[in-house]
Image (cartoon, rainbow, N blue to C red):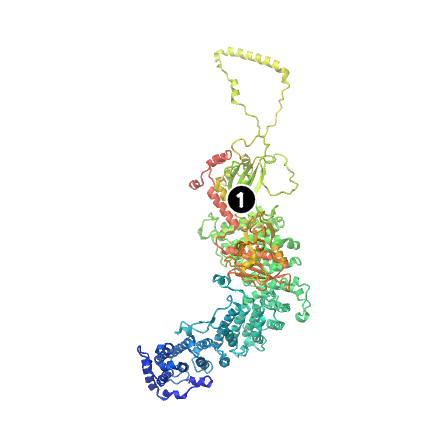
Amino acid sequence: MLLGWIDELGLIHSDPTKNILKSFPLEVKRVVISAITDYFNQQNATAKNFLTTTAHVEWVMEVLGHAFQLPIADHQTIDRAINVYNKWLFEEAQRPAPLQENLQYFVQQIFNHFSLLFEERGLDGTLGTGGSGSQEEKKHHIHLCNRVLDIFLQMGVKGDMLEEETWNHILKIILGITDSTLRGKRGLPELSYGLLKVLFELWLCSLSDDKTMWRHLQEHGIFWSKNNATINQWNSVCIGLTNRVINLLYGPSEGTSVVRIQWEGLNPKNNPNPNVGNSTTELDLPDEYVYYAWNQFLHIIGNPNKLVDPEIHLKAFQGIEVITHSLAYVGTDPPIKKLKEQKIDFRIPYAPDANSILDIFGPWYFEAVFRENANNFNQGRAVAYSALCKIFCRKGGSPIHTRYLSLFYKALCSGLEDEDPIVVIAILLGSKKIFCYEELIGSHILIRYYMKVCDRILGGASSTSGKDSAQNSKYNTEVRQACITILGSLVCFPNHFATQGVSEEYSGQANVYSELKFQIQSILQKALKSEKNPKNLQYIIWVIVVLIYEEIDKNPEIAVIFIRNMLDIVKTYAPKPLKDYPPEVFIAIYEALSTLTNLYPQIAETEPMISRETVFQLSTIIPMQVALLKQNQTSAKLIEETFYSMCDWIMCGPSVILSNKESITKVIFAVDQGLNIVKHVGVPGGVSAGVESPQSNPRASTTGTALASQSTTFTKDDIENIKISAEFVLSHLMNHVSHFPTTSNNAALHTTLSEETQCLDDLEPESSNYVRFYIYDNQYVISLVEQPNEKGGPGVTVIIRDLTGKHSWDSQVLYGEIPQPYSEIEERGIYTGSVLTEGLLNQTPEAEQNGTLMQFHIDRPLKDRDTVSLFDQMIDEEEDNEANFLDQIAPDYTSYDVSCREPNMRYKYGGDCKASMTRLLLSSVGLVHIALTSRFVPLQSNSKLLRSLRNLDGTQPRETHKVGIVYVKEGQDDQQDLFMNVEGSDQYNAFVNSLGWTINLQDHLGFMGGLDKNGSTGVNAPYYADYRTELMFHVPTMMPNNPKDPQQIHKKRHVGNDHVNIIWSEHTRDYYRNTIISQFNFVHIVLYPLNRTHKGLIRVDVMIKERTYPVFGPVLDGMILSEKVAGALIRMTALNGSRISRAKSTGIMRPYLQRKSLIAELAQRYKATLETDKYYSSLFVNKEVAQLMMDPPGNQKKK
């Protein structure tokens, strides 16, 4: 029987005199046991009335004890026996008096009886026969055992009623039951997980520090370690204790406040006993005992390398790896926001000493990785490798001892050359950032080994060739990504360490860096062709971009090579249906090509025609993509992004492109395809081709990869976006090619003039007779401001607003020579508007008065024909008089000047109409031709129109983005500390200056990013702009502190609302993503200057709030950059991150789409309707009369 087994183990000793019923037949025992259990289960039955002596109690208990040896067919009787003991244990009022007087003794006897239930038995009740009858009886048996285990756990909760001897007795009983089940094969294997749960939980609840008891547990635990259940539950307990130890050592931000154990193998749904079936246990143990128990439990199974079963060996190391990972990464991601909300005082702990972790667990790990003839144990070895990588590859903590570094490097060299890919995969995944940490002194000796593996994996060879390839193939994508990360961390090494060598003793080369550059280039070229995973291919593309930036000064030819490689992919696959590559791959290529336009001057020195080649290829692809879109075989987003990339290259090399007829023809043809996209592909959903929606796509993205999708079904919004992108290219061709940057600066892409500054009278522009408003084709808002007193004669200032911005021209009529020598170029400041001066021809001859004409009045009437003779006489008299008069004046006749005179210039503004030059200009350029009266239409001039124009002017024609830059000193962990900084290191200041140029906020004409001109947010700020983007940086160190506000809310108001933050950290440990509490900081680009061993290099971590973010670059997580390229690359990465973040937000439109929408809305509200006669009449009358001629906009629909 099971008590005998426990006796043999030396745990307890059984008394043979206590087994009187043993010799009786089964039927007799059934009758006696049934009668006793039935009685004590009656509602009014009580043991106090007749169990008055110890002998009485012992007799009844002997009967009840035999109940636990009955066949399982008698499960109801056994269940009633359990009920009796349950009442006696936990209901003091039900206990017999002798039992209460000698409680410890009888409790021990009750648990002795309970142990009898756990042994398998035959149909006749014979114990240990192996088999519990039918499946139904086995189910009842398990149910009964679980009831008893529940009583064990309840007793643990009421442990204060037990003395130490009783505690030890109960522990020995459950230890014996467990040993019998796991090692003696005498119990039910289905109870293994539950038994171990109860044993370990009771052991912890007992608070036992008895060395003998712990020795018993550890001795038996080594035997049980052959069982999966033992390893799983041991892992659960060790992990739960570890988390509590971490909490005690490092504070409330780490670990757990109680011992929380997540048990394995339990099924609460099918287990009627909630305590036994519960998968989570929380124990509030004394602090000192937690430390003691943790140390004891770690060694229960002994050395895990002695485990002979490979599967169990693997499970053991998986649990140990969780423990060491929890210890090694203390302080990496504390729940700052939650702790502050709960008002819990805490400090963010420093990473624990890696040497201490290695002192405890290192011997197990290193023994595992160096194990010989370990083919069957390679999975466990792989876990050991992974765990070691996590311990070593981290920032912070004390320097790692040389003996451990040497063992680690030796293990990596051996593992990277291992024939089993699972070991190589574990190393690559665990150490992909190994070259990023200054703590790993001498790690460069591993470069040759890593490069060899990366070449094999990324160069086209399968990373999972050989045995177990099918099992490990699912890691192929992830391990290739790890190789790409390793390459990204090494890109800047060759130039930085060009003069440093590695001993031939380690590398087999005189200088590993001299060949590293070419190895990286070769691997990337092969990977670009062989990689099929879309995400990895995007990573490769961005690593190539960083490589080009790094090499552009020393080896610009590499840019041409990779540009052509990427164009080859586009040329080969983009004209085909999307089968080989999804849209995001092509879009990543287009974005990479756009990024490289910043290096155009250097690239053009090597290959002057590279811009023409790129634009030619992109413009060729667009018509092919349009044809595929018609068949739903490509993505509309792909066409859209092709237009933008093409425009970027046109802007950087216009002279080379526009001078070639074939290139410009291709470009214009591609633009025509986009402008007439409806004609080529139709409109989805049966919408009429004439219907346009200027407000479509309210979420129009600002980056391609953000919304790229495998779906090729296009929508009306897609069609509108393609058309808008084509309009964008055409507008920039017409407005900005060869004209950007402007003569002033990059901040002002458009004019700063307005109707208010140009108006010549004291009236508002909507009332002034000198200002007229028109709209052309519902796309161009044109304001014409009369300038009567310009040099050389009166003129017109023309202000034109369209989707690309606001433009202004001054015009004059030239009838002769040009007033100023236009061939001479002079410095001109920003136009401040014309000023009306005195001196105009303001005195003209007065017109003759009507009164003087009355002198010709004839008083008498003419005679009739009857008096004709008299009339003839009068004529003769008149002729005589005239002759006499001529004779009298003849002497003076020759003194008169009868030559023809040149007419004087008339004053154009004497009448009510003040728009004569406006009328002349419009007529000269043909805008008021009768055929255009329906396209070039006057606008209702009122205050609402002016507000709409101001709203339109407030909409930037370029993308605008805000990015925060936060400086972290050593030891700063709280956002309050960060915002108090008003200065940074010289290295930090140099980096900030490399992000953009410094502008004076008070004089700045471009995007302000929410900063003030009054100095409250500083005097200066870094700013960057190109022809389609403006980027303002929020730098707390450049903003003044508020001495009355320790939180510096005015700084956080800007940085906390930025979607992207750049963190420059000089802390000795990694930056915490939630240090600045904000719901808007989606992307953190954290920079760590490697000043200790790699001065001049910067490690970069890219932390993203949401895992659903698409890939963006050029800088990727885990890269190392040189200071010379960091500014430009980080700026572009922040910009792309901001674009993606905005694309994922609702209600954000592209700026030119937003401007187009506002112009269309303005046309709908203010465009007038005029008949032809009134149209032309309005050009000759004053503004007030012209306005009366116009129909109100509401009448437009009625006509």
In this view, the residue in front, 700 or 861, is 700
Q: Residues within 10 Å of mark 1 (few under 14, many from 20)?
A: many
- Residue 867 or residue 247, whichever sits in front: 247
Q: Quadrant where the C terminus lies?
A: top left
692 relative to 1013 in the view: left or right: left
Residue 368 placement (x, y as % from top left): 57, 75
Specify whether 47 is left or right of 352: left
Measured along the vertical axis of the image, is residue 674 above or below residue 412? above
Residue 619 appears in view: no
The N terminus, quarter of image: bottom left
Looking at the rendered structure, the secondary structure element under dot 1 is strand
Q: Is residue 718 above or below residue 138?
A: above
Q: Residue under label 1, please give it.
A: 801
> 556 and 973: which one is in front?
973
Image vertical order of residue 767 relative to residue 331, above or below: above
Of residues 685 and 1029, which is closer to you in this image? 1029
Q: Residue at x 47, y 45 (%)?
A: 1161
* Coordinates of residue 276 in the picture (x, y in percent): 42, 74
Determine which quarter of the picture holds residue 1129: bottom right
Which amino acid is tagged 1? Arg
Q: Where is residue 606 in the image (x, y as percent from the top left)?
A: 66, 55
| Side of 1197 where 605 appears, left or right | right
User: Measuring 35% from the left and 88% from the top, which residue is drawn there?
Assistant: 24
Residue lying furthest left in this view? 44
The location of residue 842, given as percent across then percent down, is 57, 30
State the count of labels. Answer: 1
Residue 1106 visible in the current orientation: yes
